[in-house]
Amino acid sequence: MQVLVGTALAALMICTRGQHFASVDALPSASWAVFFLAGALLRPMWALPLFFVLSSLLDFASLASGTITDWCLSPAYWALALAYATLWLGGHMYRGLHRDAWSTVPRLALVLLVTASVAYLLSKGGFWFFSGRYAEPTLSGFIARIPHYYPRALGTLAGYVGVAFVLRSAWLGMAARVNARRSVPA
């Protein structure tokens, strides 16, 4: 099951990250959700560096093919490693809080909100202050951008994570029904 989940998460990242041979242009990037879900659903810790390598390879392949510019590939790119680690850790922490019940949805929402906020500050703040792309990167300039960009990032993360947990719930429900049928004597 771990291999299946890991493969599905990798496929989701490949299909939604950047502009390359396998991307689906209509979908927003699922990268943040992939890291959160990898922390929540995959046991091996090596999934974190593996997914970071995958995301970097996709970015560099898109750059090499000319489908993206080097705008985002700056010295601040490495702030993504911290942001992705935060997302993975948030998912890992949520794994311990999760119960297969609707009552855990508020916990999930709170963990997503806190995790996304820290990841946003690390990735977008890192880019704003350390990329060299902005002439005068002031704190007030960064704060002014938050209402424009953060809600979309949070909404995309919540949407993908919500769909993943609904799919997980459906999978567990079907598996329970199949097991119940098997255990009924004929």
Image (tube, rainbow, N blue to C red):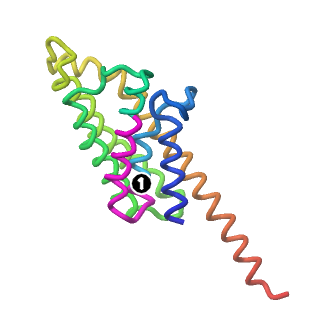
Query: Relative to 2, does residue 112 appear above or below in the rendering?
Result: above
Magenta stretch mostly in which secondary structure? helix
What amino acid type is highlighted by mark number 1? Ala
> Counting other residues with Cα less than 10 Å from the Cα at mark 1, is it few (<14), some (14-19), or many (20 or more)?
many
Q: Quadrant of residue 150?
A: top left
Q: Residue at x 33, y 53 (%)?
A: 48
Q: Residue furthest right?
A: 186
Q: Residue furthest front?
A: 64
Query: Relative to 61, does residue 146 appear above or below in the rendering?
Result: above
For the residue pair 132 and 149, the one nearer the viewer reads as: 132
| Residue 6 spot, x, y in % from top left | 48, 56
Query: Relative to 70, does residue 172 appear above or below in the rendering?
Result: below
Residue 46 in magenta stretch: yes
Q: Residue furthest bottom?
A: 185
Question: In this picture, which residue range is highlighted in magenta?
Answer: 39-58
Query: Relative to 104, does residue 79 appear above or below in the rendering?
Result: above
| Residue 123 spot, x, y in % from top left | 27, 34
Residue matched to label 1: 38
Q: Residue at x 40, y 31 (%)?
A: 153
